[in-house]
Image (cartoon, grey):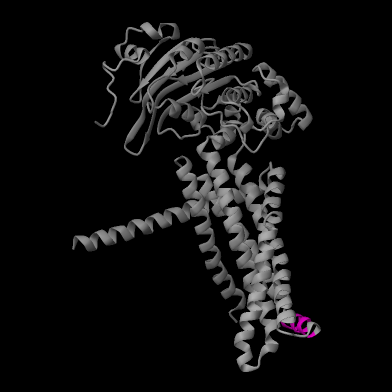
Amino acid sequence: MNAVLDFIAALGRAALNLVRTAGALTLFGLTALSHLVRPPFYWRIFFGALIEIGFFSLPVVALTALFSGGVIALQSYTGFAQYHAQGAIAGIVVLAVTRELGPVMAGLMVAGRVGAAMAAEIGTMRVTDQIDALTTLSTNPMKYLVTPRLLAGTIALPCLVLVADMLGVMGGFIVSVVKLDFSAPAYIAATFAAVKTIDVTVGLAKAAVFGFLITLMGCYHGYTSRGGAQGVGSATTAAVVAASILLLASDYLLTDVFFSQ
Amino acid sequence: MTQSTPKIRIRGLCKAFGPKIVLDGIDLDVMPGTSMVIIGGSGSGKSVLLRCILGLIPADAGTIEIDGVDVLTLPPRRREEVIETIGMLFQNGALFDSLSVWENVAFGLLAAGRRHGRRPSRAEARATAGRVLEQVGLDPSVGALSPAELSGGMQKRVGLARAIAGQPDILFFDEPTTGLDPIMGAVIDGLIVDCVRKLGSTAIAITHDMASAQRIGDQAAMLYKGKLIWQGPAASLLNSGNPMVDQFTHGRREGPISMELRR
């Protein structure tokens, strides 16, 4: 009987903890967003974050997209060849890349690269009193550290995904034409016939949501980190794990909303 | 405000973290233009006291008056204006490592200027930062360096420069000589005394370095288990007549203060 009660108590504690964290995270995000419309806005921090997230993530996102597009072309050829449906490969590649793989792969790469770096940077500032120092120097830490990064993440990720979409399709094209002997003009024509504006725009909208979530997780876990180097390490791990899970969960929800019909 | 009104007046200040009571009804007056040194063992609540005054940690109960105004009941914007009149030197410097030294020193000037709509240009801010660096005995060329390129003593000086750059009415020093060799500690203490005198500021310093406490302070107080157990002139720290203060200042193992050690 005691074991059952202990189990229920542990479940209750976990549930309460989850609700508490969700509440704190929501308040954190809303406070950061409210600073968007309350001056001053720190443009230097914003542009710095934009370059860090958008520009310096470009190589890793580009390579991931290129190879992912190629892999989809190869894998779908293996399956579709059994039904003599190789003609659908161009459509499969472009839809998979623009709707799912572009935003999700770019999001996961940025979560690993930028989310972790943000949590580590802000976490280190927290444990070395730099965030307290900001407050004593007439600067709101949320306004200075969090709001510009959230905006930069929300803007930078769609730009990255646009590049990832093009390179993903190019990866599929290269594999199909060079390795699978497809006709280049026919592949391009099939690609344009399959893709619709909404496929790309919804992919970009997803990317904006992912960008917001990744930077929110990085900033939140860094901002609330405690206890020296170990605390910063835990915050970094938590930021990447939470961002990845939230990214995939929100991807499912957005896909259900936009493409379930 | 008359000359007899304390610059900082604290009454019944309480703060607990869960079951641990850190500040237990602190009453403290700091008169204008004086330097108060607060001593006490590690974990006695010295840093928490400063952080409560700055609003970095919310107090559980009590009042903190600055120039007769209770800052704990002020709306956030007014409170920010009060905080703007306080300069703080953090224990480890807390310099922003993503900014250069001059940007660190000028940070408060630029932020205050931004708030009041008369922000100095970056060139003006850099020139001012150079002058403040000279005041703390550093060459203005140091301004171009990153904080990571500085020694511990230089980082403390830059932290001091940042604290005084806005010519604050009140200065707080959190363990200003911790981690420094005795000579550098004396240099930093000398700079602190000079800066406080030049600015005419009221200062609170927390330390457990007795030499530093006597050099910096006009008045002194000792925190023990969340309470102020003694207040008096800093010059009498070593012969206060209070057995607890005497044990602490002379570093004796035996006495009324028992360290909570696990055996």
Residue A90 lies, with reference to residue B205, above or below; the image says below
Q: Farthest residue to the left: give it.
A: A1
In this rendering, the count of numbered labels is: 0
Q: In the rendered image, is residue A225 in sight?
A: no
* Lateral position of residue B136 relative to residue B55, left or right: right
Is B96 in front, or is B73?
A: B96
Q: In the figure, residue A137 lies in which quadrant?
A: top right
The residue located at (58%, 58%) in the rendering is A111
- Residue A193 colored magenta? yes
Work out which quarter of the rendered image holds the C terminus of chain B and state it.
Answer: top left
Q: Position of residue A30 (x, y in %)?
A: 57, 52
Can you say which quadrant of the picture contains the N terminus of chain B? top right
Quick one: A26 or A152, which is closer to the camera? A152
| Residue B180, position as x, y percentages in the image | 51, 21
In the rendered image, residue A38, in percent from the top left (x then y), is placed at 66, 45
Please identify the quarter of the rendering in which residue A188 is found.
Answer: bottom right
Q: In the rendered structure, which segment of residues is drawn in magenta?
A: A186-194
- Where in the figure is residue A224, as x and y percent of width and height? 49, 45
* Of A164 and A138, the residue lying toward us: A164
Q: At 28% from the left edge and 58% from the top edge, which residue is drawn?
A: A9
Q: Majority secondary structure of the magenta segment?
A: helix
B225 is higher (above) or lower (below) than A36: above
- Residue that appears at 39% across and 26% down: B42
Q: Front-most of A16 and A7?
A: A7
Does the magenta portion include B227? no
| Residue A104 at least partly seen | yes
